Each structure stands twice: as structure tokens, then as C-alpha cells.
Image (cartoon, grey):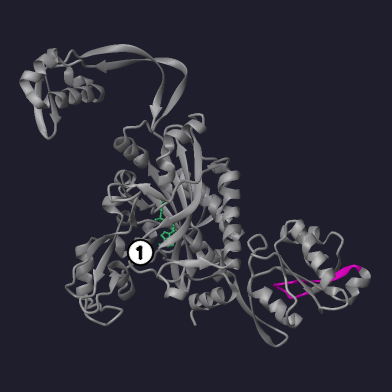
Amino acid sequence: MSEGERLTELAKRRGFYFPSAGAYGGASGFWTYGPQGAALKSNIEDAWRDRFVVREGHQEISAPDVMPEPVFEASGHLAGFDDMIIECPGCGATHRADHLVEDNTDIEEAESLPNEEVMEIIADHDIECPSCGESLGGVSVDNFNLMFETNIGPGSSSPGYLRPETAQGIFVEFPQLSEYARNQLPFGVAQIGKAYRNEISPRKSLVRVREFTQAELEHFVDPEEDEPPLEDVEDVILPLYSGESQQADDGGVEEMTVGDAVAEGVITSDWVAYYLGVARDWYERIGVDMDRFRFRQHLPGELAHYASDCWDAETEIDGDWIEVTGFAYRGDYDLRKHADHSGEDFTVFKQYDEPVTVSRPTVDPEMSYLGPEFGGDAQAVADALEALAERDPDSFEGSEVTVEADGQSYTVPVEQTNFSVEEVTENGEHVRPHIVEPSFGVGRLIYTVLAHAYTEDEVDGEERTYLDLPPEQAPTTVGVFPLMDKDGMAEYAHDIADALRAAGHSVTYDDSGAIGRRYRRQDEVGTPYCVTVDYESLEEDTVTLRERDSTEQTRVSIDGLAETLDRLADGETTFDAL
Ligand code: GAP
């Protein structure tokens, strides 16, 4: 059984996650988190919120899942959020063409290749349909838009889409969010919420699904002035798999501090470097095995339409590398696009410390000349003259000036443009912020944390499976068991469970079956500690405390039990020291 299959079996059996709507045959790519999974998910989200929102001093919002079509026209998703699809002529099954290439050749990252090349590779390698075995040579590779379309209200006059990334819900609200930030850069806005992609072939349980949770941070910065606090992370060691290493014959992962990676130009954006440093320690905190982890730089052909540099955090499972987070420097792409399409102001007014006097070239074209001369194009020519005056005032030095408008050249006597240079005093300027974006997939993190926590050992000659989850992430922090359901032990154990819950612990009370079986059940869901009430408890007010990983047991007083568990979880004490 592969690591993934073992995990999926455990996840279903113990209530982490399972395919949705099974009673009706299910729908591929949709998963329900059971009680353990929902608790783990919310613990990971809380840890993310704590590190990337609260500690960074950012704000969090919650925007709608459905957004109107113009949002996605502006963002570029309508025109270009596509995957390569190939349809089997034999059985009609559809597949991701780039995945077929990756699965059947040595080629990695085939999504960066043009469709025609992928089609050729499929033909050259005689790749067959994984569903029926029919040859796919010569079958066309097309684009398939991944967005789920819907109608907003009755009728079809107002199309909408389920958001394919939570980020757009932040970008479109920039004018409002900027006001809340008192128009002062830098500021960050985060969101944890659902994103939807109609994936051609969902696979590997939570890894490629059609509905998933993203935790995204959009950090708006002034590209001229703002610098990240790199000194906070400069000594963090990053496992970097750079674009150069990927293209070299003998390239591999290189361990480098954040400081060195920036100094040597391996990571070109200081902001991206900062977040890689912050994130590296956070992954370790939530239980990612750092021996199965790397940051991989996007190759040029792989970059998203908005990104100038991008690194993915990847985790290894079953020998495959899975992207769990994308770190992108998006520049001003998103705010520029939304400004152009909406006509709203997506800039921040930056006040100067002191007013400055600047030369401002202006034109005031004679429309009584442009109108008869250029007819319907007169306004376009006037606009082009205005833009040229700002961009290249020297062009107005001769007797004539030539501008381009709508693909045509127009020559205008300079005297008809009323060109002049004025001295003006300015108090500030409009700045379009750049965006730095760490974008985490929560489901893939859950999958990784569970896969990396999965451990098998032998206890008293018996095989045991347990999840060595960090206590902060464990769905249940303590299991409470009465040794027997008699002589007041159950009531005593219930009281302890209630007291621990009141102190903020997530408690599972279990009185069914032998104690050994109850321990195993908690081991399998990663509960770090269990408390057993026995006859001695009734007389001495002590309980048996058992540690998951070592299976060691010790007697502790019920006085201060909640605090003892807190100190163990925080690493302030060890089990041996109790
Ligand atoms: N706003 C940027 C953005 O959405 P992305 O790389 O497309 O970037 C970010 O997605 C993260 O979302 C990925 O690193 C991955 O963890 C998660 N993700 C993307 N598509 C997914 C899918 N179909 N199923 C599960 N997680 C997915």
C-alpha cells in the first residue's frame, strides 16, 4: 500500500476526511472533513492566522465565494485560467494532457509547454488513454477554463463565477481596504476561505480537488520605499531548488540562509525571501517533516500571468513533490487591471514630508484644428498628445509632433498643441502598490501533515500506528478514560473531562473496550496525552498520564492537570520531568 492509500484508509476510518455524498455515488473532487479532520483543519488555520495575520499586524476579511463576471474579465481568469485537456476518442474520458506527459516521460512541469508541443510528445511517445488504453496520438490538446460558472439571480443576464482563488475578493475591495489602512503603505489583508476549480482530473484525495480552502495574504507595498524586516529571518536556513539548479544536469536542493539567498541573487525579491523565511519555521511548527520539504522556483514558462518571481513550497509524499504554497511577487498587475476595467482609483496617495516643486509639461490641443483635420479620431489624437507630453516632453521641441493613436500616425503642428511647461507645487503622489502574495492550500497542508505524522512501531510485541502530530495541531489534546464503568470511576472521569474542557482542552471521553484499545484509537488520531482514572484516583486524587509517542506512563495529581498538559504541549516541561 502506498503512503497515500494508507493515509486515505486511516482518514476515512478515523474521521479525518472521506469522499462527499457517497450515498448518491459522490462527485469526484469533493471531500468532507469528518470530526477529526475539521478539528485539524481549524487548528492549522488558527496557527496560520496567528503567524501570518496577527503576528505580522495584518487584517483579515471574508469576501463572497461568488463574484460577477467583470471581476474575472479584469483579472485575466476568463481568458486564460485554462488547463490542457485531451479527450479520448475511444471512451470519451477527459485527461490533463500535461499530466499524461509527466506520467509517461521524464519531462517535468509539462504545463509550461505549448499545446502543440504536448500533442507532439503524446504522439511521439504513443501515450494511451489511462481509462481504456486507446492511443491518444494525433488527438488535439485544447484549453479548458477551470472556473465554475453560475447565474446571479434568475435568468442568464448576470453571469457569475465561483472564485478560483480567494485573492480576487481582496483585490477588488482595495479602494475600501486602503481607507481602513488610513491609506498608508505597507499593509496586508488576509483571507481564509473556499476556492473552486473545475479540475479536469481530480486526484490523490485532498491534493487536487474541485473545492478547497486557501489561506492567502496579499501584502500591499510601495515598490520604491518599503522593505521587509529581513533581519528577523536572515539566519533561517531554506532548502532551495532554484530555476538554475532545475535546469542543470547535476542540480539539486541547496541549503542557504535567507540572508545569503538574497545577497547572492538566488531569490530576487526581498519580500518573497522574507515570507519564505517566516513560512519555513511555520511549516515545522505545524508538523511538516523538514527532511521532506523544499522551496522550488518557478521556471520562466511556468510563471502565472501575473507573477514576476514565484517560489513554491513543496512536500514529498510517495516520492512525489506536492505544491502546498505559492509565494508570488505579483507587481501591480492586479490593481492595474481592476483600475482599468472598473474606472475606480486603485492607488494610494502618498503625502510628501514637504511639498516639492516640479516641472509639469502640459498640452491643451486646439480642437478647432484637430476636429476638421482628423474627424472622429480627434479625441484619440488629443489624448495621445497629452500622454506624449508627460512621457517625452522633448518631442515638442520642433515645429511638428507625431503621435500614434489606434495604430495610425498623426502629425500635428506644435503650435496647435499649446504645449507648455509649468512649475507646480505637489504635496504628494498617487502610488499603485505592488503585491506580495503567500498563497497556502489548507487541504494539501492537512494531507502533508498527516502523511508526515504517520508512524508505525511495535509496542509489547504488537504493531501500532500513531500520528506524531504536534500537540497544537492535534484534533484532540487529551483522552480521558475510566478504567471501569463502576464504583464512581466514570463520574470521576467525567468531572476531569469537564474541568479540562473548561480549561480550553479538546477532550475525548472514551469508556468502551479494553484500555489498550482505547489508547490505540487515540494514537491513531494523534492525541498526545491520555488520562486514566482507576481505584487509586478515587482515594488519592491522582491519575495515570500516558504519553503517545513513548507510550510511557506516570502518575500525576489531578490538581493542576490542565496546566501540566499545557506546559507539556508548550515544551516548558518534559514527560520525564513530571
Ligand atoms: N492566488 C494565487 C493562487 O491561487 P495557486 O498556486 O493557483 O495560486 C495556491 O494556488 C495554492 O492553492 C496551491 O499552492 C495549492 O496548495 C492550493 N491549490 C490550488 N489548486 C488546488 C486544487 N485543485 N486542489 C487542492 N489545492 C489546490
Query: Quick one: quadrant of the C terminus?
Result: bottom right
> Magenta span has 499?
no
- Please tell me which residue lies in front, 524 or 287: 524
Asked if residue 420 can be seen in this view, the reply is yes
Vertical relation: 411 (above or below) 297 = above
Residue 557 figure quarter: bottom right
Q: Residues within 10 Å of mark 1 (few under 14, many from 20)?
A: many
In the picture of the structure, the residue carrying the numbered disc 1 is: 199
Residue reaching furthest to the front: 154
Residue at screen point 82% across, 62% down: 561
In percent of width and height, residue 102 lies at 32, 70
| Residue 268 pos. (x, y %) | 41, 46
Residue furthest toward the left? 373
Determine whether the beta carbon of the residue marked 1 sits less than 8 angstroms from the nearest atom of ligand 1: yes
For mark 1, give the secondary structure.
Answer: loop
Identify the residue at image location x=33%, y=45%: 75
User: Up-down: is 140 above or below 53?
Assistant: below
Q: Residue 287 vs residue 175: left or right?
A: right
Regarding residue 572, the answer to whether it shows in the image is no
Pick whichever, 94 or 465, lies toward us.
94
**Residue range corresponding to the magenta coloring:** 541-552
